């Protein structure tokens, strides 16, 4: 069965086509971000990106689209396009939860044993999810304020770095000469929950756009190490409670090599994560989850009911 996946929850447009486990097409169309994400522009750009590129794809048997959470205008563009295409082809369509797609992508890729625990770290979300089986999830904890990626983006912007900031911090950290050390506070120590807003403020106080590249590079190195330690410690804490063999890290921030290493060093279980290119938002994860869900739960009606705040 050929499944087309359309991802339009935020700014980047993801389009993918799979046939069973074969990936026939998977592209991400990045938008321009001189001033960060502007919701109306994002919605218009999604429309243009899908219109221009959908022609490259052969006719699918099922169309999957992101139904939430995300920017409502962006979601509507993807959902409308998907529904209209499905209607014209006379094929079913299926609404996909963006968070569930991030969480389940490594399972689709590597087919390990359930249950597992997933640390979802992205620009919009930071949460720990216990996955008993497909469709049966327990959110263990989440961030009380900013998401980890959102914090990285804001700290990077404060240093005059480009968006998305997580990648820029990772790049600059490689140039550290360790002549200056930076220390940061540890938020919510005795809890499974996350908090990044206080850490963001503490970080922003220590660095600014006018500082030298050497200082910024050292800052990025120590900041990235610190964030990696915080995330790994939360996982280790939860590992004691949920006796699972398998761990998953997913979402855009899971592309970070330092964070991956810190989590692997905790050494509590097997750690699975997507390849770097498919950690950030993409159409493949939408098609992949559809291939898991469709046989069990079936298609969605033709009505468009996007949900900007759809929880997992
Ligand atoms: O999953 P994603 O594409 O979008 C959401 O669902 O939010 O995640 C985007 C986030 C951004 O905050 C970006 O800075 C971060 O992922 N990110 C990274 C890296 N690549 C992307 N953070 C750290 N290191 C990276 N290599
Ligand atoms: Zn995402």
Image (spheres, rainbow, N blue to C red):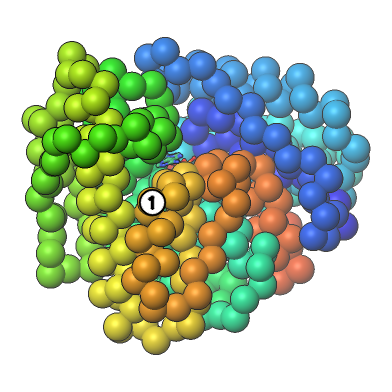
The residue closer to the viewer here, 265 or 188, is 265
Residue 77 in percent (x, y) is at 61, 29
In the rendered image, is residue 95 in sight? no
Q: Is residue 105 left or right of residue 235?
A: right
Q: On the rendered structure, is 90 left or right of 148? A: right
Q: Can residue 188 be seen in this snapshot? A: yes
In the picture, measured across the screen, residue 202 lies left or right of residue 114, that is left
Which residue is depicted at the point 73% across and 40% down?
A: 26
x, y (%) of residue 208?
Answer: 17, 21
Q: Which residue is mark 1?
A: 258
Q: Residue furthest bottom?
A: 243
In the image, residue 3 lies at what x, y percent?
A: 80, 50
What is the secondary structure assignment of the residue under circle 1?
helix
The answer to whether 288 appears left or right of 216 in the picture is: right
For label 1, being within 8 Å of ligand 1 is answered no
| Between 196 and 312, the one nearer to me in the picture | 196
Residue density around tag 1, few if under 14, some if 14–19, many if 20 or more, within 10 Å = some
The residue shown at (71%, 71%) is: 296
Q: Residue at x 49, y 69 (%)?
A: 271
Q: Dividing the image into 4 quarters, which one contains the C terminus?
A: bottom left
Toward the viewer: 292 or 170? 170
Q: Quadrant of residue 157?
A: top left
Which quadrant of the structure image shows residue 217? Answer: top left
Residue sitting nearer the eye, 258 or 123:
258
* Count of numbered circles in the view: 1
Ligand 1 location (quadrant): top left
Which residue lies at the image location 37% right of the left edge and 37% below the top edge? 174
Quadrant in which the N terminus is drawn: bottom right
Q: Position of residue 305 (x, y in %)?
A: 56, 43
């Amino acid at each position: 069965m050929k499944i087309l996946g359309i991802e339009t929850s935020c700014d980047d447009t993801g389009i993918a086509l799979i046939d069973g486990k074969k990936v026939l097409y998977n592209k991400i169309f990045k938008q321009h971000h001189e001033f960060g994400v502007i919701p109306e522009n994002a919605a218009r750009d999604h429309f243009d990106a899908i219109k221009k590129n959908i022609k490259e794809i052969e006719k699918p048997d099922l169309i999957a689209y992101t139904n939430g959470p995300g920017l409502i205008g962006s979601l509507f563009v993807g959902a409308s396009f998907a529904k209209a295409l499905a209607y014209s082809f006379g094929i079913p369509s299926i609404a996909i939860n963006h968070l569930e797609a991030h969480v389940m992508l490594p399972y689709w890729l590597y087919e390990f044993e359930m249950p597992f625990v997933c640390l979802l770290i992205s620009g919009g979300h930071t949460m720990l999810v216990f996955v008993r089986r497909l469709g049966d999830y327990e959110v263990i904890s989440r961030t009380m304020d900013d998401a980890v990626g959102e914090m990285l983006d804001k700290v990077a912007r404060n240093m005059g770095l480009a968006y998305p900031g997580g990648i820029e911090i990772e790049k600059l950290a490689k140039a550290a000469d360790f002549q200056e050390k930076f220390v940061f506070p540890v938020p919510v120590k005795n809890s499974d929950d996350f908090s990044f807003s206080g850490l963001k403020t503490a970080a922003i106080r220590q660095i600014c756009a006018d500082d030298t590249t050497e200082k910024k590079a050292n800052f990025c190195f120590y900041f990235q190490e610190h964030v990696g330690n915080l995330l790994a410690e939360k996982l280790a804490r939860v590992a004691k409670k949920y006796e699972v063999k398998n761990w998953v890290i997913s979402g855009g921030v899971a592309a970070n090599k330092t964070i991956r290493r810190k989590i692997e060093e905790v050494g509590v279980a097997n750690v699975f994560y997507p390849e770097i290119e498919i950690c950030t938002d993409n159409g493949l994860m939408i098609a992949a989850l559809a291939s898991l869900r469709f046989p069990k739960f079936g298609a969605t009606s033709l009505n468009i009911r996007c949900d900007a705040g759809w929880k997992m």
